[in-house]
Amino acid sequence: MTVAQDVLDAREHVRKLDPESTASPWVVLGVEKNKLVLVGQGDDYENMLPLFKSDELMFGYAKVVVGDDMSKREKFVMICWSGGDVGLVKRGKMITLRAEVDEIFTQRAKVIEASDVADLTLESVKDQLIKSCGAAYGSSTS
């Protein structure tokens, strides 16, 4: 598999670790002629959501900060998007594409499969990460 350099650069943009930053960097990949292409990237999670189209197979990768007042943790989430208007034949290609994306985005705490943007709000994703990663200590009382 050959991965375009702009896709690899976007991945590194998301992986950059800056403990002082509250940004949620992200990248979205689309599919053109059975190849993964960069659709967009940025630093504000909410700006990623409008890129997911109802008639497309797409993939997202984002860094999300979760935790409480006792500890903050950076977690990576991968989104496998199959819009509600995607036909069955096109939807079947998701398996092959997903294998390629798994090789690109190897670091992740959670994979979310979605077809409705409402399932991808930042709060919803944080809730899913907290449930899957454990160690939610709550507020300190001392």
Image (cartoon, rainbow, N blue to C red):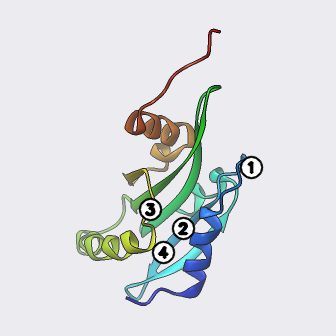
Residue bearing mark 3: 54
Q: Earlier in the sequence, mark 2 or mark 1?
A: 1
Residue bearing mark 2: 28
Residue 124's place in the image compared with 30, above or below, is: above
Q: Are marks 2 and 4 in contact (CB under 8 Å)?
A: yes
Residue bearing mark 4: 30
Mark 4 vs mark 3, CA separation in Å: 12 Å
Q: Position of residue 2 (x, y in %)?
A: 43, 90
Mark 2 vs mark 1, CA separation in Å: 21 Å
* Residue at 57% over, 70% down: 11
Element on which disc 1 rests? loop
Q: Amino acid at mark 2?
A: Val
Residue bearing mark 1: 21
Q: Earlier in the sequence, mark 4 or mark 3?
A: 4
Q: Position of residue 92 (x, y in %)?
A: 23, 71
* Residue at 62% over, 9% down: 141
